[in-house]
């Protein structure tokens, strides 16, 4: 899928602090323009499995601004597979072309079925999934966010031998697949910290299904009001970070992650002279729709 894994390098940030913390960013966002970071990692083995089993298409869940939806649409097209997105919000049925994420996915050939929010809540219910598999029997089902055993397996390839020097490894958490992969491939002495974008009580059980190591922690102090929500402070932090380091963050995941790490350094959470690695999982696709929303409210926008 024309992915350039060699682009995923660790960049040291010229970040000066009293505790001598060394801060690095793993540039998973650079491996591909569309399916960057954890999206490629989660889809890699799912797509191999789908083709091995003879499925003709991919069926998956996502929200209207999900990075996962266009990633699946793009990857499916590259693999000559059909794709169907089960999208949260039936009100989008007649206006999805006004949504940059869904329009792009549609242009790649993805078909949509728009679900009410109540129905969407059943996306992990075994009875509901059984009915879906009957309805779309030729389609391979990938869960929301790509998190299943194959997605976790792909995320176990994010860390390399070179990353054994780090004391802390930090990542954003949406469905838990990336964190699970990092935990499974880490050393016992390393601390893996996940920064949750949703209420963590829904994630703890999901993550525990995939991991056995105990060297991880889930934090939900930096959600800025909830999934996909931002405020002026976060947008200004993103813009300041871009100005200082020439690195673009996304508004849903990595901005909150990096903000949280900086705050924890300020609060002396990390041991002095520690090496901290932040996983930049991409998500830039979400900036345009977020800026459109911010402009409609006459609010500060994200500098690209």
Image (cartoon, helix red, strand yellow):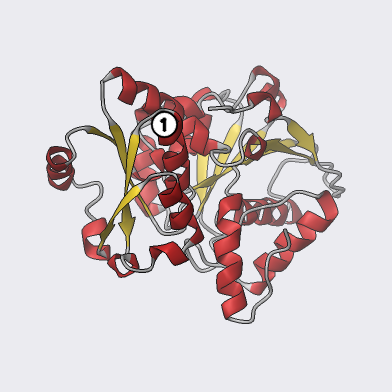
Of 81 and 25, nearer the camera is 81
Q: Is residue 283 above or below residue 51?
A: below
Which percent across, then down, holds residue 191? Answer: 59, 35
Give neighbour class at mark 1: few <14, some 14-19, many 20+ (Cα, 10 Å).
Answer: many
- Residue at 54% x, 23% y: name it: 157
Q: Is residue 215 visible?
A: no
Which quarter of the rendering shows the C terminus? Answer: bottom right
Q: Helix or strand or loop: what does disc 1 sit on?
A: helix
Residue 71 placement, left or right of 224: left
In the picture as drawn, the residue positioned furthest to the bottom comes out as 298
Residue 82 placement, left or right of 303: left
- Residue at 41% x, 45% y: name it: 175
Of 129 and 96, nearer the camera is 96
Q: Is residue 42 above or below residue 118?
A: above
Of 283 and 171, nearer the camera is 283
Q: Is residue 257 visible?
A: yes
Q: Can you tell which quarter of the image residue 131 is in?
A: top left
Which percent across, then down, holds residue 271? Answer: 73, 40
Q: Is residue 144 above or below residue 224?
A: above
Residue 175 placement, left or right of 244: left
Which percent across, then down, holds residue 199? Answer: 42, 58
Residue 216 placement, left or right of 233: left
- Residue at 63% x, 82% y: name it: 298
- Residue at 26% x, 21% y: name it: 54
Residue identified by numbered label 1: 151
């Amino acid at each position: 899928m024309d992915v350039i894994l060699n682009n995923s390098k660790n960049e040291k940030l010229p970040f000066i602090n009293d505790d001598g913390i060394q801060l690095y960013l793993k540039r998973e966002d650079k491996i591909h323009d569309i399916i960057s970071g954890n999206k490629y990692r989660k889809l890699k083995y799912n797509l191999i499995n789908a083709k091995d089993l003879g499925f003709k298409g991919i069926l998956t869940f996502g929200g209207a601004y999900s990075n996962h939806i266009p990633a699946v649409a793009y990857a499916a097209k590259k693999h000559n597979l059909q794709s169907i997105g089960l999208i949260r919000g039936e009100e989008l049925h007649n206006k999805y072309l006004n949504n940059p994420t869904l329009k792009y996915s549609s242009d790649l050939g993805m078909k949509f079925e728009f679900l009410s929010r109540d129905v969407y809540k059943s996306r992990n219910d075994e009875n509901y999934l059984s009915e879906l598999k009957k309805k779309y029997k030729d389609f391979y089902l990938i869960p929301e966010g790509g998190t299943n055993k194959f997605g976790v397996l792909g995320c176990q390839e994010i860390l390399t031998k070179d990353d054994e020097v780090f004391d802390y490894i930090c990542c954003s958490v949406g469905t838990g697949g990336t964190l699970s992969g990092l935990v499974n491939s880490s050393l016992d002495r390393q601390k893996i910290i996940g920064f949750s974008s949703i209420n963590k009580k829904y994630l703890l059980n999901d993550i525990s299904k995939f991991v056995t190591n105990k060297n991880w922690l889930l934090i939900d102090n930096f959600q800025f009001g909830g999934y996909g929500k931002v405020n002026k402070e976060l947008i200004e932090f993103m813009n300041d970070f871009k100005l200082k380091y020439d690195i673009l963050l996304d508004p849903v995941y990595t901005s909150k992650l990096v903000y949280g790490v900086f705050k924890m350094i300020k609060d002396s959470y990390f041991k002095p002279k520690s090496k901290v690695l932040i996983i930049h999982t991409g998500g830039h696709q979400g900036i345009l729709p977020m800026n459109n929303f911010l402009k409609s409210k006459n609010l500060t926008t994200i500098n690209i």
